[in-house]
Image (spheres, grey):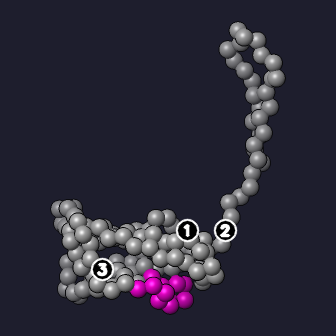
Amino acid sequence: SFALVETEKSFYKPSETVKMRILALDHKFKPLDANFSQLIIKDPSNVTVFQLREVETVNGLFESSFKLSSDPNLGVWSILLKSNDPSSLLPSTNVTFTVNKYTLPKFGVSVIHQSVRRVDEYNISVLACAK
């Protein structure tokens, strides 16, 4: 048996909502109703910023979300899922995501083509430039 913790994406910006999901499966990869003592989110300084107690999967799934502040610690954050029983078949699980201020690069595309074509032309020439 195992539990998989995943986030909607790997990189988040300040003020975004981190959406997470737990998938618990048995040894035959079938959904497993499981109980976990805690779900903890820690920032890059190892400070606990979000915590849920007694997390239960229903039909193998559990979903939750956490809103980042507008000025969070930037870097690699971690989500730790702790098992109720140290001898459990479901070990504790840890996954990370990154919080950073980023913007998508700006670029431009221009297409140069003939302004007039004949009706019987099957091929046209174009020049595409990107920067």
- Kind of residue at disc 2: Tyr
Verify whether residue 28 appears in magenta. no
Q: In screen coordinates, is 57 left or right of 81?
A: left
The tag earlier along the polypeptide, 1 or 3, is 1
Residue labelled with disc 2? 102
Residue 45 occupies quadrant: bottom right
- Kind of residue at disc 1: Phe
Q: Which mark is residue 45?
A: none
- Give the quarter of the figure containing the N terminus: bottom left
Within 10 Å of disc 1 (Cα), the crowding (few <14, some 14-19, many 20+) is some
Q: In screen coordinates, is 10 left or right of 82?
A: right
Q: Furthest residue to the right?
A: 115
Q: Which mark is residue 55?
A: 3
The tag earlier along the polypeptide, 3 or 2, is 3
The tag earlier along the polypeptide, 1 or 2, is 1
Magenta part of the chain: 41-51
Verify whether residue 42 appears in magenta. yes
Q: Measured along the vertical axis of the image, is residue 108 above or below residue 94?
A: above
Residue labelled with disc 1? 11
| Secondary structure beneath label 2 | loop
- Kind of residue at disc 3: Val
Residue at x-position 61% and y-position 75%: 14
Which label sits in the foreground, 1 or 3?
3
Alpha carbons under labels 1 and 3: distance apart: 24 Å
Residue at x-position 40% and y-position 73%: 64
Residue at x-position 30% and y-position 80%: 55
Q: Please provide percent x and percent y for residue 19.
A: 45, 69
Q: Please provide percent x and percent y for residue 96.
A: 47, 75
| Secondary structure beneath label 3 | strand
Q: Tell me if label 1 and label 2 are in contact, CB under 8 Å.
A: yes
Residue at x-position 23% and y-position 66%: 59
Within 10 Å of disc 2 (Cα), the crowding (few <14, some 14-19, many 20+) is few
